[in-house]
Amino acid sequence: MKRRTLSIVLIVSIVLILALSACKKTVGTPEDNAAAKEEDAEEEEETYVIGFSGIDMENPYFITLEQAVREVLEEEGYKLITKDPGSDCDAQASQIQEMIEEGIDAIILSPVNWEEITPSLEALKDAGVKIINVDTQVKEMSYVDAYIGSDNYSAGVICGEDLIERCPEGGKVAILECPTQNSINDRITGFEETLATAEKGFEVVAREDTGGEFGRALEASKKIFEENPDIVAIMCGNDQLAVGAKTAANVAELKEVLIYGVDGSPDIKKELKKPETQIAGTAAQSPINLGKSAARLTIDVLLDHSFESETYEEVFMINKDNVDMYGVDGWQ
């Protein structure tokens, strides 16, 4: 009996020792868990950090673009830092410097001013940050690792072709532009060069720099309509400007003027559903597809995979005839 009792005590003691040893591996002193902490730190360090700097994060187009970028990157375990320059090139420069100091590995960038962004591009390159230029090109493309955007020249072309078909006799035209944004420059160039091919002439009687902003587009359009009540059409560099032009046309009680935008925004598509609207159409982009493609491109650049240095996505006309195909409650 005594020998059996001693055996039982010995077995219990061994079990307790083993249990305590097992616990010590996970809940011991900081020294005991140092290896696990080092592994966690290494995992955090391996996560790429990517910056996003759009032109204006109050613009629904850039909001949607950023959301699509974020969805893809976060699914892949990357961290996204977003800054809003609010159409201010100085603010964008300051925010880019902040992101460099925060340790970004790459940036997805749409410049507020395609020329004045150059010092920021230099700073990014010096810091070893990969630059993915999206939607609106920078002037000094040699700094950029990759560019992806819509075919903006074609957007202007399809608006011009539509106007020629609607107004075969030609007429007076106005333009709402933004010289600091190359995407808008390309759209306006495509539009004007297409009108130049018309059998009957179109005369550009006014052009206004709107800075790409709704408020400035509204005031510029009021002025244009006051001075040119017989205008047949107004070409707008994006849909926000088109909404400003439409508001001014309502104030001036001009029902026949044709207004063109670029983007394919829900606001413009809703206008196209109305029985009477001055909106003739919008050369549509897909910020959802563009954002997802930009995110995947960024990953390829960071991981040194093969990628296209320049990618241009197709645009298409949305008007009264086909708006139901694309819906009005969101972006295509």
Image (cartoon, rainbow, N blue to C red):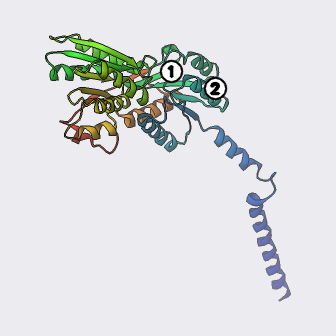
Q: Residue at x 20, y 16 (%)?
A: 171
Q: Nearer the viewer, residue 297 or 181?
A: 181
Left or right, 231 with respect to 123, comes to: left
Front: mark 2 or 1: 2
Q: Quadrant of residue 276?
A: top left
What secondary structure is marked by label 2?
A: helix
Q: Position of residue 232 (x, y in %)?
A: 22, 21
Q: Which mark is residue 25?
A: none
Q: Which residue is mark 2?
A: 97
Q: Secondary structure at mark 1?
A: loop
Q: How dense is the environment of label 1, judged by Cα within 10 Å: few (below 14), some, or many (20 and up)?
A: some
Q: Amino acid at mark 2?
A: Gln
Res. 332 visible in picture: no
User: From the image, which quarter does the N terminus lie in?
Assistant: bottom right
Q: Nearer the viewer, residue 26 or 20?
A: 26
Instruction: Kindly identify the residue that appears in the image at 35 percent across and 16 percent down.
Output: 207
Q: From the viewer's perspective, is residue 9 above or below residue 184?
A: below
Mark 1 lies on residue: 145
Q: Quadrant of residue 45?
A: top right
Q: Quadrant of the C terminus?
A: top left
Q: Nearer the viewer, residue 41 or 320?
A: 320
Locate residue 179: give its quadrant.
Answer: top left
Q: Position of residue 310 (x, y in %)?
A: 41, 20
Please tell me which residue lies in front, 29 or 257.
257
The amino acid pointed to by label 1 is Asp
Left or right, 6 with reference to 182: right
Left or right: residue 125 compared with residue 23:
left
Q: Position of residue 160 (x, y in %)?
A: 24, 19
- Residue 122 drawn above or below residue 71: above
